[in-house]
Amino acid sequence: MRIGVVGVGQIGSAIARVLAQTGRYELIASRRNLEKVRELEDYGVRLTRDNREVASGSDVVFIAVKPYKAVDVVREIADLIRGKLLISVAAAIPIRKLAKAAPDAKIVRAMPNISLIVKAGFTAYSLGPNIGREDEEKVKQILSELGECMKVEEELMDAVTALSGSGPAYVATLIEAMAYAGLKVGLPREFAYKSAAYTVYGTAKLFLETGIHPASIKEMVLTPAGTTIEGIFYLEESGVRTAVMKAVEAATRRAREIAEKLNQGD
Ligand SMILES: NC(=O)c1ccc[n+]([C@@H]2O[C@H](COP(=O)([O-])OP(=O)(O)OC[C@H]3O[C@@H](n4cnc5c(N)ncnc54)[C@H](OP(=O)(O)O)[C@@H]3O)[C@@H](O)[C@H]2O)c1
């Protein structure tokens, strides 16, 4: 399968590199300043400044430019993607708007996160109306190369953006906080960061692989009058759960505001 990526910046270059590394796809990618991503050529990605060359040379095209540019870029390549899958990762830009720009393309809206750099991303996707079972399988196959993927109703994309799209920043804050705590109680720096990160990683893996509910994982660690309940007491007192809930709720609100502004009059 030939895959194109228009806009190889932060997320687009990660998508191109990870897909190229599998050895299962031919990659072609574009941006204006190619010097910044020359290393992609080491993975076999063909680079060009011409978005139309990307579109004509691929079976599936990712759009990974900033949201305010997505529609123009899709319009620029519309005649070359008739009948092809177009996967837009641009936040806030709805399928109907992309479909207006390229009426004959098969549009998918996806929201990945930056952890796809290490093939541990989480990507939510919504399908346009003209996508059949075979195309959906193709979409799932490609997005699974980047980590886990799940289908979601498009109306939930702002919430997805706020939770898993922005999520690596929240979890990084938690890892940093735990590492700082380690430093405060005297752990060596590298030890503090690694033990914090592996604890986050292992706890997520424990939940995902066993299905043990997070509340029960806590119960497995808590002993009466022990150390963990002492720590949990302060976490609860500081309102850590409501802080996270407020953060995601605020980010969802912001995602909606941005979407409304970008899509005004459409
Ligand atoms: N970063 C994330 O964690 C993340 C997660 C999920 C979704 N997204 C979405 O992914 C998109 C890109 O985000 P990003 O953080 O990767 O931004 P970014 O680093 O700025 O990447 C965008 C790239 O598009 C290129 N570009 C600009 N105009 C272009 C054009 N006309 N034709 C081709 N390429 C063009 C830019 O390179 P030149 O200036 O050299 O052309 C730039 O490298 C956004 O829509 C965002 O909502 C990002």
Image (cartoon, grey):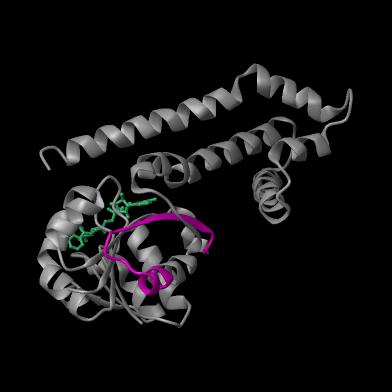
Q: Nearer the viewer, residue 170 or 61?
A: 61
Image quarter of residue 129? bottom left
Which of 31 and 111 lies nearest the eye of the viewer?
A: 111
**In the rendered view, does 102 fall on the left or right side of 140?**
left
Q: Which residues are magenta?
A: 119-138
107 relative position to 26: left or right: left
Q: How many marks?
A: 0
Q: Quadrant of the N terminus?
A: bottom left
Residue 257 seen in the figure = yes
Q: Residue furthest top?
A: 237
Q: Residue at x 19, y 56 (%)?
A: 98
Q: Quadrant of ligand 1?
A: bottom left
Q: Residue at x 16, y 62 (%)?
A: 74
Image quadrant assignment for residue 181:
top right
Q: 75 and 182: which one is in front?
A: 75
Q: Is residue 111 above or below residue 158?
A: below
Q: Quadrant of the C terminus?
A: top left
From the top left corner, tell me how far across and down residue 170 is, in percent.
51, 38
x%, y% of residue 128? 29, 59
Q: Is residue 122 magenta?
A: yes
Vertical side of 148 occupied by 241: above or below = above
- Identify the residue at image location x=38%, y=34%: 252
Q: Is residue 51 left or right of residue 35?
A: left
Position of 84 with respect to 174 (left or right) is: left
| Percent of width and height locating residue 29 | 27, 72
Where is residue 44? Give x, y as percent.
37, 82
* Residue depicted at x 41% and y 78%: 43
Queried whether the magenta region covers residue 265, the answer comes back as: no
Let me know if residue 50 appears in the view: no
